[in-house]
Image (spheres, rainbow, N blue to C red):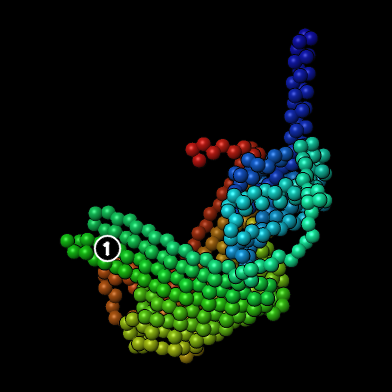
Amino acid sequence: MLKSALLLSALFITSFVYSQEDINNLNIFLDCNFCDNTYIKQNLGNVEFVRDQELSDVHLFFVSQANGSGGYLYEINFIGKERFEAINYILKFSTNTDMTSDAIRTELIKHIKIGLVRYWIANGSITNVSVNVPSPENETEDTQVEDKWDYWVFRIGASGYLSGEETSNYSNLNVDLSAKRVTEKNKFSFSARFGENRSTFTYDDEDIVAVNSSKAIDISDVLSINDHWSYGFFGNIGTSTYSNYNTYWRFKPAIEYNFFNYKESAKKQLIISYRNGLVFNNYIERSVFGEDKELRFQHSLLLGGSIRQEWGNINGEAAFNQYLHDTTLNSLGFYVGANIRVFKGFNFNVGGNYRITRDQINLPAGDVSLEELLLQQQQLQSGYNYWVNVGFSYSFGSIYNSIVNPRFNF
């Protein structure tokens, strides 16, 4: 009888200790679609990761935006739940193009730990928490960092692909380079690219070769007016065998209004923009309108927006393009996409695009051969194009998912 009582007491004490440990660990919901979640779970202790935001003590909500150095500005929103609902704040940090993925995830987890300190204090679970700060003798006065590149960022890249079998082979080559300078008042961008796709098919000892190539140079300069207005200039020049362009160029000034402050664009934005300018086309083959080359005015209007919150994200746009010499030559396109957390464990996503095309002035006259059709050597006339995707996911079971097991990687 005494042994049984001692055993029950031991089990009770053990259960109490484990329950205390569970209470002292913060329940974290990690809401990040670009993070290395495995690395975070392996290197962040004193917490439990849960699979639903309603089961969390702290909801970590991440957003990011490209910055001028070729990196990203990361924003971590610490959203307290239930007994921690009074503790809410945001931490931000920036990366640059020289940082490796390991350096970025190290910086990310450092800021997560800093942000969780207040929650650990409020939770009474600071036994294993320590904070390192520089000693006074190691502190230096803040100095203005001198940027020898004056905010310019350059990039050059190339890629190739080759595949084949006995009766066919395919190769692809892409080369690109870019230069950009981004400040609060001005965003200038230059890019150049070359691409070639080559397919060879052997039939009855005869080789059928299909080649599509394109070259393009794009230049844009965007200037800030205030927190809601911007204007810019956009131009490009290039060639495309697929689109029947021996050469083409465009120049379009533009103006844009954001109904929200641009500083909130990582979480929400609603913009309307208007462009109007010149379009020049010099065709490889005479166009369906009997033109070898032509210079036209074209304008476009775009209304688009996006919202990213802890319940999910929604984004969409409507775009209208029209040639001014003949207003019947126009296109109208719509896009919408959403990923919404409907209720505990259930997520719904939908996306779709539909475009009415009545402005394909570049199409060559004459019939398309079966060979050109099958090998997709030439753009074809189409009054519309679309795509749609719909999906959902539902998960249930244990609320905890802190354990990481990388074996066989599935």
Measured as percent of width and height from the top left, residue 224 is found at 67, 77
Task: Name the foreground residue: 341 vs 14.
Answer: 14
- Give the residue furthest to the front: 137
All told, the count of numbered labels is: 1
Q: What residue is rendered at 77% in x and 41% in y?
A: 130
- Give the residue furthest to the top: 1
Measured as percent of width and height from the top left, residue 234 is found at 54, 80
Which image quarter: residue 261?
bottom right
Up-down relation of residue 365 to residue 205 (above or below): below
Q: What residue is rendered at 70% in x and 45% in y?
A: 28
Q: What residue is rendered at 66% in x and 51% in y?
A: 107
Question: Label 1 is placed on what type of residue?
Answer: Thr
297 left or right, relative to 211: right
Up-down relation of residue 294 to residue 168 (above or below): below
Where is mark 1, residue-wise? 200
Up-down relation of residue 323 to residue 53 (above or below): below
Quadrant where the N terminus lies?
top right
Q: Residues within 10 Å of mark 1 (few under 14, many from 20)?
A: some
Q: What residue is rendered at 51% in x and 80% in y?
A: 235
Measured as percent of width and height from the top left, residue 206 is found at 18, 64
- Give the residue furthest to the bottom: 325
Q: Is residue 320 visible?
A: no
Badge 1 marks a residue whose secondary structure is strand
